[in-house]
Amino acid sequence: MTKYRRPPYPYCPWCARPLPKEKPFRQECSSCGFVLYHNSSPCIGALPTDEVGRVLLGRRAVEPYRGDWNAIGGFLQYGEDPFEGLEREVREELGVACEVDEFITMEADTYGSDGPALLNAYFTVRLGSGTIRPQDDISELRWFSLDALPENIAFESDRKALQVLSHKTERSGGGGEET
Ligand SMILES: [Zn+2]
């Protein structure tokens, strides 16, 4: 994987003149006036839950963290509605529709240990009918009890989101007790 080049950027994307670097995340071009803002990339994370309180995770087929378990989801596209993005990601990775259930948390992270900054909003979802199959950048799918999550979870933001989900589930007394 090519090493991620962190801002400040060297040249204006419009007029190609050198950019000032005093403010690395807000670079104003002195030639054409364009302001290059650097922000965390918005991501959306889906946490499908079932009637016994388990959560569905996908195993990453790609770097970074290839082989580790990961919340379903990914980067939002430019200007995309976040809920449409969530449904798109679920459909791309699982092959089924979903219904958004509840906001869980929002976490800052990076894409890989030295990658670009991201901001991931997590929601529980109810999956629609149909057989789920791992697709896109996912090699395997598995339902996990919240008290028996795998050790190798890919992202710090995913680990935090699963913690928040576990606490919410404990407080509401739901999950895992039915026969
Ligand atoms: Zn410029």
Image: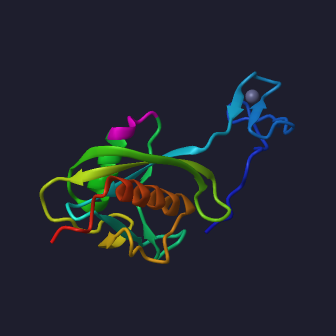
Residue at the image position 60 percent from the left and 44 percent from the top: 40
Name the image quarter holding residue 173.
bottom left
Q: Ligand 1 is in which quadrant of the figure?
A: top right
Most foreground residue, 80 or 49? 49
The quadrant of the rendering that contains the N terminus is bottom right
Q: Nearer the viewer, residue 41 or 167?
A: 167
Q: Is residue 140 above or below residue 91?
A: below
Q: For residue 103, which quarter of the picture?
A: top left
Compared across the picture, whether 65 is left or right of 144 comes to right
The relative height of residue 125 versus residue 58 in the rendered view (above or below) is above
In this view, 174 is above or below 75: below
| Residue 124 in view in this figure | yes
Q: In which quadrant will I find the C terminus?
A: bottom left
Write the residue at 23% across / 61% down.
50
Helix, strand or loop for the magenta stretch, by majority: loop
Q: How is the image coloured?
A: rainbow
| Residue 120 in sight here | no
Does residue 166 appear to the left or right of 3 in the view shown?
A: left
- Tell me where the magenta segment starts and ends, as one range: 79-83
Q: Position of residue 109 (x, y in %)?
A: 60, 54
